[in-house]
Image (cartoon, rainbow, N blue to C red):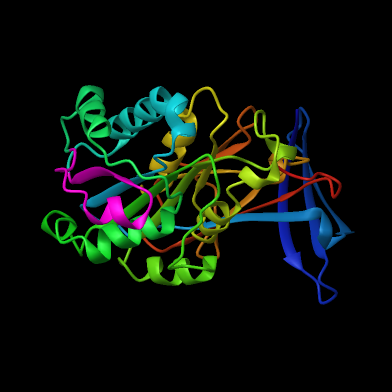
Amino acid sequence: MIIFFLGFFFACTPEHALKYEKVVEEVIVVEEIVVVEETIYEEIILDAEDIWVDYFVQLETYDEIDVVWVIDGSGSMNDDEERLLEGIDVMMRNLPPTGWRLVMVPSGIDSAGGETQFPLLPGDDYTDAKIMYDNLGREVQESGFDGIYSYMADNSYSASWMRSDAALLVVFVSDEDDQSRIFSEVIDFTIWYEFQRKHVFLASIINFHPNDSDCNISPVFHGDRYEDATNYFNGQVVDICDTDWSPGVIEATSQIELKDTIVLTHEPLDSGAIVVFIDGVKTGEWTYNPFLNKVTLNDTPPELSLVEVAYYYKSDDTGR
């Protein structure tokens, strides 16, 4: 009977390369129970550029979240109504069972500043969302940044239901780019928004660049300002051309929850050589799904912990 024990150890060399050390122990058992043990050390230096590390920092927990959908009210958005309402319905069904409030406001300063509809609450459904949407103010201004600013800073009604200690998720929906006057630069908006709550999240449903879009034929309609702001907060960007926004909305909703999974950027060359760290400590309490290219931790990592997943990949793999 031959039994093999394989161990893998990673360590960085002074030349910033990765040391790969394989230990093989061979145990041979014969009838007279004579045991021969042999240990072989094999050292291979692999180029550091063949290593990729995906990571995330765990969220802090919170009990409440305020959600604001900032919606482009121009006529070109009329054919998006069904997908928009289905997206909001999906979000309501995927939010925590308690503690959330959701409202729709129009993009633009004037209408958002005067919006006074009571927010949707746990237990509300598609019909309630449709009523809110039908009563939403319409404005030709396609300026989502100005819209959320006007609603939160200038609209006294928002203060009657929004909670300063709750997390905040804003979802921009528009088939054109942001044209805000208050925030001429994206960085101006992100700085303002970042300080509105201890926990802030952003998502956008927009036209992608024509090179990446199924329906947008002009760079003029690319929502790059919304995209830049959303990427700043590591949020979800959904293609408005998608026939079903639900998967993207579910992803946007999941960003406000504690994580126990991470989808890898590249496909690992060897799933058996994946290494997972939590706050710098290696852990074996995880599984890898090759079909979804996703690592799932057995236990949800604690708040603010750093989760890292290291693996070998093909250097010409451009990633997801």
Give the side of residue 117 with respect to residue 89, left or right.
Answer: left
User: Measuring 26% from the left and 24% from the top, which residue is drawn there?
Assistant: 126
The quarter of the rendered structure image containing the C terminus is: top right
The image shows residue 159 at horizontal and vertical percentages of 15, 60
Give the side of residue 221 with respect to residue 125, left or right.
Answer: right
The image shows residue 163 at horizontal and vertical percentages of 18, 59
Eyeballing the image, is 309 above or below 150?
A: above
Q: Quadrant of residue 90?
A: top left
**Would residue 304 be visible to someone looking at this image?**
yes
**Would residue 308 be visible to someone looking at this image?**
no
Eyeballing the image, is 214 above or below 257?
A: above
The quarter of the rendered structure image containing the N terminus is: top right
Seen as rendered, the residue at the extreme left is: 160
Q: Residue 171 or 91: which is nearer the viewer?
A: 171
Q: Quadrant of residue 197?
A: bottom left
User: Measuring 34% from the left and 62% from the top, which residue is drawn there?
Assistant: 149
Q: Residue 204 or 146: which is nearer the viewer?
A: 146
Q: Which residues are magenta?
A: 99-120
Q: Residue 48 or 212: which is nearer the viewer?
A: 212
Q: How many numbered marks, from 0 up?
A: 0
User: Measuring 40% from the left and 42% from the top, which residue is drawn there?
Assistant: 254
User: Measuring 22% from the left and 34% from the top, which residue is drawn there?
Assistant: 135
The image shows residue 229 at horizontal and vertical percentages of 52, 59
The image shows residue 211 at horizontal and vertical percentages of 75, 39
Q: Quadrant of residue 308?
A: bottom right
Seen as rendered, the residue at the extreme bottom is: 14
Give the side of residue 94 with respect to residue 21, left or right.
Answer: left
Q: Is residue 117 on the magenta stretch?
A: yes
Q: Residue 308 or 118: which is nearer the viewer?
A: 118
Q: Is residue 215 on the magenta stretch?
A: no
